[in-house]
Image (cartoon, rainbow, N blue to C red):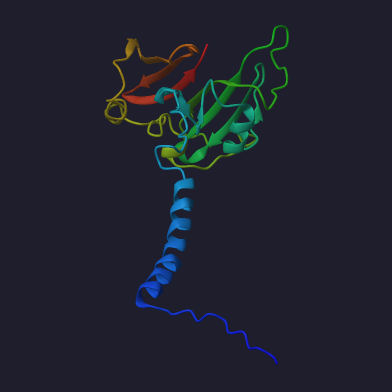
Amino acid sequence: MKRTVRQPVKHHTPATGLARRTCAFAGPVLVGAALLGAVPSRSQIARPAPDPTPAIARIAGIRVGVDTFKALKARLGSGSPMKGSRGYAWTWRAARCVIRATFASVPDAPEAPVFDADIVQAVSLECMPPGSSGDPNCPEVHGYVRELGWMGAVIPGMPRSKLDAAVRRLPRCEQHGEELIWRASSPAPHGQRWAAVVRIKDGKVASVRVATP
C-alpha cells in the first residue's frame, strides 16, 4: 500500500511578508551605498597645481620662458624666419603690429634651426610704421587683444591712460626714459625671472617685449 508523503505547509504571516519586502528593498540600497562609497569626494580628487607663471610672461597667446616653439606654432602658425637670429615673425594686421619670437642663441650659429622642443626666450609686439601694411612675406595671424595682447590687454598703439588701467594690479614699474619695466620671478626652487619692457612714444605704447634670461 502506497503512503502519501505530505510536504509541510508554510504559513505566511503578515510579519514574514514584511520581512521579505524589507530585504528586497534593502538590497539595492546597500548596493547603491557601496557604489557611492567607491566614488571619490571633491576633496579627494587631485587638483592640478596652480600655474606659477606670472602675468607679465603672457604675450601672443603663450608663456615666455615656459612654452615651446611647438606650442607657439600651434597658436600662431608657421612664422617667417628672421634674418640674423634664431627667431620667427608674424604680422598681426588687425592690431597694426608685428609679433617677433626669439630663442636662445647658439655660439657661432646665429641662424641655427629652431626645434619644436626649444623654449621661447622672448616675444615682442612692435607697432608698424605709419602707412605700412606689413611685410607681404610675413604670415598674418588673427586674434583678439584678449588672446594675443600682453597680459591679454595691452597692444602697440594703446594710449598711456589705458596702459595704466591694464597694469594697475602689477607692482610698481621701473622707468628709464621712455621705457617702463616690470620684473617678476617664480618661486623656488626654479627661481626663473622675467622682464617686460613697454616703450612709450608720443603718449602711446610703441612696443612691448617680454624676455627671460
Left or right of residue 23: residue 66: right
Farthest residue, direction bottom: 1
Q: Residue at x 51, y 15 (%)?
A: 212
Q: Is residue 121 above or below residue 26?
A: above
Q: Residue at x 47, y 20 (%)?
A: 210
Name which quarter of the figure residue 175 lies in: top left
Q: Is residue 137 visible?
A: yes
Left or right of residue 134: residue 209: left
**Observer-nearest of 10 and 36:** 10
Locate residue 103, reporting x and y percent.
61, 19
Counting every numbered tag in the picture gives 0
Q: Residue at x 60, y 21 (%)?
A: 119
Locate residue 88, reporting x and y percent.
62, 26
Name which quarter of the figure residue 42 lies in: top left
Locate residue 72, reporting x and y percent.
59, 31
**Observer-nearest of 2 and 205:** 2
Image quadrant containing the N terminus? bottom right
Farthest residue, direction top: 107
Name which quarter of the figure residue 156 lies in: top left
Q: Is residue 134 visible?
A: no
Q: Is residue 37 above or below residue 59?
A: below
Q: Is residue 15 above or below residue 189?
A: below
